[in-house]
Amino acid sequence: MPSRLLSFLSDLERAIAADDPSPSDGSWENARSVNYHLGLARLLLSVRLPEGGKSEPRGSILLQGYVLADGSPCLKAALSWTGSDRNTVRSVFTRPDVDWTREARKIAAEWMGGPPAKLDLAPNGLADNISLAEAGRVAAVS
């Protein structure tokens, strides 16, 4: 699994660069780190802007490689975006037909799509439903 971490990071970087080769008229400036002992890897994604040459952070993808109880390797990817409190986690399980490059492209495309939308749960509507459910339960017990 350790070699899978580094190759998967490379596949992610290539897929992101192919999807948007010139973000904000700048260039991708990524930093990666891998801890083979812990089975962890991190890809920090930033864009080097043309004016002033300053770097603008965009987010990160964290990878965890581990072995399932049946002995098959698995890879978990946690996607996060700068300025968003929303995160997404995806797992890639080893199967005979798994294409790791295609899986990296799917995860990269999901990251490029931006953070997931917030669900707007109206507290009053939720409270009303809970009150109705409790009233029904009380009526059923009586």
Image (tube, rainbow, N blue to C red):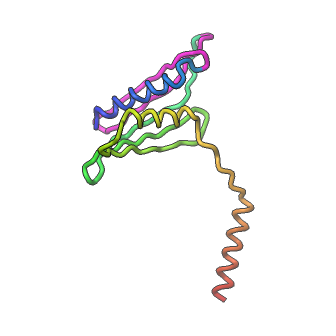
The kind of secondary structure the magenta stretch mainly shows is strand
Horizontal and vertical percent position of residue 114: 58, 35
Give the residue furthest to the bottom: 142
Is residue 42 within the magenta segment? yes
In-image side of 53 versus 38 (left or right)? right
Q: Residue at x 47, y 36 (%)?
A: 106
Does 13 sit left or right of 112 as displayed? left
Position of residue 101 in the picture relative to residue 81 (left or right):
left
Number of numbered discs on residues = 0
The outermost residue toward the left is 71
Query: Which residue is painted at 56% across and 17% down in the image?
Result: 22
Q: Could you tell me which quadrant the C terminus lies in?
A: bottom right
Foreground: 42 or 71? 71
Quick one: 42 or 94, which is closer to the camera?
A: 94
Q: In this view, does 3 lie above or below 142?
A: above
x then y, percent, for residue 75: 36, 42
Q: Please state the extent of the stretch shown in magenta in the rendering.
A: 24-52
